[in-house]
Image: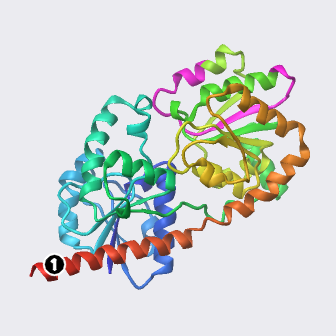
Amino acid sequence: MIIGFESSALHGHKSGVGYYTENLMSSVMKVAPEHRYVLFSNRDIGPIWEQLGSEEVHGRFFPVRQVWMQAVLPLSLRRVRPDVCHFTNYLAPMACDCPSVVTIHDMTVFITPRFHQFKKLVLDRTLIPKVARRADAIITVSNSARNDIVRYLKVPEKKVRVIMNAVSPAFHPITDRARLDTVLARYGLYGPFVLYVGTIEPRKNLVRLIQAFAQLKKRGLPHKLVMVGQAGWHCAPIFAEAERLGLARDVIFTGYVPSEDLPALYSLAESMAFPSLYEGFGLPVLEALACGAPVVTSHSSSLTEVAGDAAMLIDPLNVDELAGALYRLHKDACLREELRRCGPARAALFTWDTAARASLEVYEHVSAGRISARAITN
């Protein structure tokens, strides 16, 4: 087959969707090297496509992804004529002649609209339902997300395949002291800390996390709260909360951190807090578990599917409960060690090899279905 991937998420600083796209593509190509792979992007994505052994087709530089996707990408697809194209980031061209698979990671624009810019809401709430109806198959990353997709987009459940994320082998407990010390020095971290990883944005519930951390400081904990991630939409109130509570020196915002430094940070953290209000998957939780970090996360959306019994689950709306879980982890060394032991075993249940093989099944099914339909029509 000729398999296409819409790969614009690989441009620049990668977030969750970028890592999903990179890991899935590389695993699919490793599992099935007999196919031809073509990557489509509106921007140069660097040497990664050559390393993966694929071809890149992106035409002229288009800074606005949506304009490129609707006006230019259909022309490239007609020229290449892939047997199937996988759109890994929610959206696809309305004029798409080839068999298509789209990954819809979550339903945040429908479930938590107050956490999105108005422009994004209008665009995504208009296009995503149309994309979902036109796609030959939908992939999503948790049962929770599938239930939300079926409910909000009114698509048949059989059209939506759950293929869960994983983490790369780079995420494992780091014990090399020199490597750990290098990362500590790079970010100016000294002493124990609670870690958060993810975009700095309202949906991640970070104001409540800072409020919970303030309770820990009042109880005499010497820790810092290290918040790793690039600033997102409407992040000012989050920074302001740290100032308001007098925690400017105790809450450290590192900004974007490259993925190669994350395993060391997870391994160094006394605990990792991820009290998000809604997630389609929650990749930082799985990364932390893989590295043996004791995790406190929400008992909502997909996070229970990811964490299982290898993390402490809390009500994300209850600041006292979040603070209590973090304090208990600090005081109970046996509990920390138990979670450090359980985390990697839990994370090992999720593999990109499994995800790649399941995705290939979807591609083959979609491609064969389109061929059969054409044969019947003709």
> Is any part of residue 172 visible from this angle?
no
Left or right relative to 210: residue 12: left
Instruction: List x then y, in percent, for residue 163.
Output: 49, 64
Callout 1 amino acid: Arg
Give the residue furthest to the left: 378
The front one of 123 and 37 is: 123
Instruction: List x then y, in percent, for residue 321.
Output: 72, 30
Instruction: List x then y, in percent, for residue 373.
Output: 19, 77
- On screen, 240 above or below 321? above
- On screen, 281 above or below 221? below
Q: Which residue occupies 86% across, 52% down?
A: 337
Mark 1 residue crowding within 10 angstroms, few (<14) / some (14–19) / many (20+) = few
Q: Which residue occupies 65% across, 54% down?
A: 287
Q: Which residue occupies 81% across, 31% down?
A: 223
Q: Which colouring convention does the figure follow? A: rainbow
Magenta run includes residue 132: no
Q: Which residue occupies 74% across, 63% down?
A: 345
For mark 1, what is the residue? 374
Magenta run includes residue 233: yes
Q: Look at the image and tell me in which quarter the N terminus lies.
A: bottom left
Magenta extent: 218-240
Element type at marker 1? helix
- On screen, 338 above or below 199? below
Left or right relative to 206: residue 90: left
> Is any part of residue 113 visible from this angle?
yes
Q: Look at the image and tell me in which quarter the C terminus lies.
A: bottom left
